[in-house]
């Protein structure tokens, strides 16, 4: 009885969530972003858990900022996070919107050259800007193989997967089997995979290395994929431009030590590369993510 009730509740929640997504997606992009900005501003003004976590993270990562500068960055980041949440609905339900609003791609020549030379590519796209735009761009341009973690709401999961497969691409579950599928595709390539490199992993899948000068549990999967596939890594984010200008895809080469055979050395280089990317648009990073919630055992 309990299991049936939980399933029924999740089904109802899923339908309500999809209905909300459709309502938000119906807004033109200009109004969509204004709506998201309003939600973000209200979250900053009212306070609460999101603001508290964002404030803690900014204090940890930017100790050099004055209180006034940090408060300004906090407000900007929460407004941008609100925009990101709102525009996600529009992009999931209308994937061509993402491609139409990419106004420039910066730094893609080395990435394309690697693929043309038969080398697979691992795109490292942190929680910066609009990562769904990166996904649409990759799947529309290249042979994309990526992993996904299904939502517990089946209706939402169906919408997201249908959206991500709009331009093609092969998707694998986020599991050992999925990792094997991605590795196989990269070795048989040239192919492209995309990973969020700043997610907090479980204990078995991470090591503590510096991130913004703090010992941070960091996922080993991106570096292990590089080592197993012999591929090239690129740092990528879709920068949200002012008003309704759209997005600029920004591609950067990572710190060269990311290819080092020593895992900790490579992971530290990856984190330095993520940090450098964040510093290009710190207000567009999702600071309300509990990135530092795990500490080394000896702390």
Image (spheres, grey):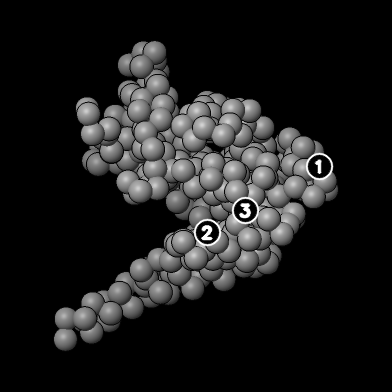
Sequence-wise, which precedes: disc 2 or disc 3?
2
Residue 167 or residue 109, whichever sits in front? 109
Q: Position of residue 290 (x, y in %)?
A: 32, 40
- Tell which tag, 1 or 2, sits nearer the viewer: 2
CA separation in Å, label 1 and label 2: 25 Å
User: Which residue does the numbered mark 1 point to in the structure image?
Assistant: 113
Q: Secondary structure at mark 1?
A: helix
Q: Point out residue 271 in the picture as x, y percentages from the top left corner.
A: 49, 31
> Total number of numbered labels?
3
Residue 193 visible in the snapshot: yes
Residue ID at (49%, 35%): 263
Residue 53 vs residue 211: left or right? Answer: left
For residue 179, the mark is 2
Q: Residue at x 37, y 70 (%)?
A: 153
Determine which quarter of the picture holds residue 124.
top right
Checking the image for residue 193, the label placed there is 3
The residue that appears at 41% across and 30% down in the rendered structure is 209
Give the mark nearest the N terminus, 1 or 2: 1
Check if mark 2's residue and mark 3's residue have beta carbons within 8 Å.
Answer: no
Q: Confirm whether residue 94 shows in the render.
A: no
Q: Quadrant of residue 48?
A: top left
- Element under disc 3: strand
Asked which secondary structure carries label 2, the reply is helix
């Amino acid at each position: 009885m309990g299991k049936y009730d939980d399933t029924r509740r999740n089904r109802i929640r899923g339908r309500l969530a999809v209905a909300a997504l459709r309502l938000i997606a119906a807004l033109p992009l200009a109004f969509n972003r204004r709506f998201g900005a309003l939600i973000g501003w209200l979250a900053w003004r009212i306070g609460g858990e999101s603001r508290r976590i964002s404030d803690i993270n900014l204090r940890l990562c930017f100790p050099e900022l004055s209180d006034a500068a940090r408060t300004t960055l906090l407000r900007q980041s929460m407004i941008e996070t609100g925009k990101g949440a709102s525009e996600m609905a529009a992009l999931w339900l209308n994937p061509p919107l993402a491609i139409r609003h990419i106004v420039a791609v910066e730094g893609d020549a080395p990435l394309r050259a690697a693929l043309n030379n038969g080398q697979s590519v691992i795109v490292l796209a942190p929680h910066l800007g609009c990562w769904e735009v990166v996904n649409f761009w990759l799947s529309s341009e290249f042979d994309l193989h990526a992993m996904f973690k299904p939502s517990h709401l089946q209706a939402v999961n169906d919408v997201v997967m249908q959206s991500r497969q709009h331009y093609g691409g092969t998707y694998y579950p986020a599991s050992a089997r999925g990792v094997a599928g991605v590795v196989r595709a990269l070795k048989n390539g040239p192919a492209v995979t995309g990973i969020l490199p700043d997610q907090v992993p479980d204990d078995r899948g991470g090591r503590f290395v510096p991130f913004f000068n703090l010992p941070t549990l960091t996922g080993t999967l991106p570096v292990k994929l590089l080592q197993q596939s012999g591929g090239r890594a690129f740092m990528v984010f879709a920068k949200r431009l002012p008003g309704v200008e759209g997005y600029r895809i920004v591609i950067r080469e990572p710190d060269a030590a990311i290819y080092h055979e020593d895992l900790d050395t490579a992971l530290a280089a990856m984190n330095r590369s993520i940090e450098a990317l964040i510093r290009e648009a710190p207000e567009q990073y999702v600071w309300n993510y509990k990135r530092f919630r795990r500490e080394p055992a000896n702390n």
